[in-house]
Amino acid sequence: MTQEVAVSDGAVATAGPRARGAAVAVLAASGVLVVGLDLLTKQLALTNLSDGSVVRLLGGLVYFDLTRNSGAAFSIGADFTWLFPLVAIVVTFMIALLARRLRSLPWALAMGLVLGGALGNLVDRLFRAPGFLIGHVVDFVSLLAPAGQRFAIFNLADSALFCGVVLAIFLELTGRRRDGTRVRGNADAGGPAGNHAGVPDSTRDEV
């Protein structure tokens, strides 16, 4: 049975190895799923768009247009391709460290999306032309116009990383923490009647 453990700053944590195991499983599964889908979609793009053809979808909202990117979004840092795999490795290492105290499923999903996005593009940097650590990323999704005329061309890994960062920001802003706690306001700051002054109004996060 899951236990709630009060912490000093007004949050309530969920204790127990089951919570951590479930969170780590979600992190790993979402990361692996993102990497797998990213590799699959990139291979489909290479197979079907290498001849220079462009696929128009949704009335021109989305175009599939293959390109190889040596930099980041909008080709930023194109002369420093070697730097991006190092950043991805650092991100992966940091997520592995943070996972030791991970108890929240929403945070696990956010971290899994970031991890999968980082690893998806890292594979390109390591194994695609022109060489190890300087490989060009396969991008093929262009919005509103082909060839990135209106918006940067991106791939599934980029999308997952972006969504993971947005979700992480949302969780931070709403007081949810990676260890399964969720911070609430104090009773003397507008909490419900009946609470003792100075006793935090807090709830258990989803785990």
Image (cartoon, helix red, strand yellow):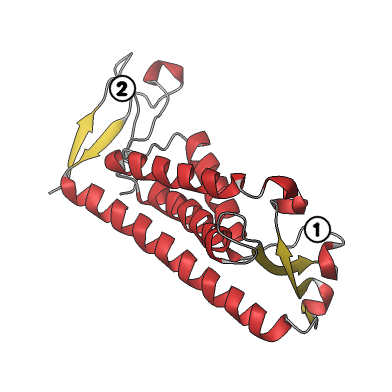
Q: Give above or below for 203 relative to 108.
A: above
Q: Secondary structure at mark 1?
A: loop
The disc at residue 135 is none
Which sits in the foreground, 152 or 52?
52
Which sits in the foreground, 18 or 196?
18
Name of the residue lying farthest toward the left: 1
Tally of marks: 2
Q: Is disc 1 in contact with disc 2, using a CB cutoff of under 8 Å?
A: no
Label 1 sits on residue: 151
Residue 144 shows in the view? no
Q: Give above or below for 53 relative to 162.
A: below
Q: Position of residue 136 (x, y in %)?
A: 66, 61
**Residue drawn 72% across the image and 52% down it:** 73
Alpha carbon distance from label 1 to label 2: 52 Å
Q: Position of residue 127 (x, y in %)?
A: 54, 65
**Residue drawn 54% across the image and 69% down it:** 38
Answer with left or right where residue 129 lies relative to residue 100: right
Answer with left or right where residue 2 lies relative to residue 184: left
Label 2 sits on residue: 195
Q: Position of residue 77 (x, y in %)?
A: 72, 45
Q: Secondary structure at mark 2?
A: loop
Residue 165 shows in the view? yes
Q: Earlier in the sequence, mark 1 or mark 2?
A: 1
Estimate how packed mark 2 is, as few (under 14), some (14 to 19) or many (20 or more) residues with alpha carbons within 10 Å.
few
**Residue drawn 16% across the image and 43% down it:** 16
The three-letter code of the residue at mark 1 reads Phe
The three-letter code of the residue at mark 2 reads Asn
**Residue drawn 35% across the image and 27% down it:** 201
Q: Nearer the viewer, mark 1 or mark 2?
A: 1
Q: Position of residue 92 (x, y in %)?
A: 43, 47
Dividing the picture into quadrants, the one containing residue 44 is: bottom right
Estimate how packed mark 1 is, as few (under 14), some (14 to 19) or many (20 or more) residues with alpha carbons within 10 Å.
some
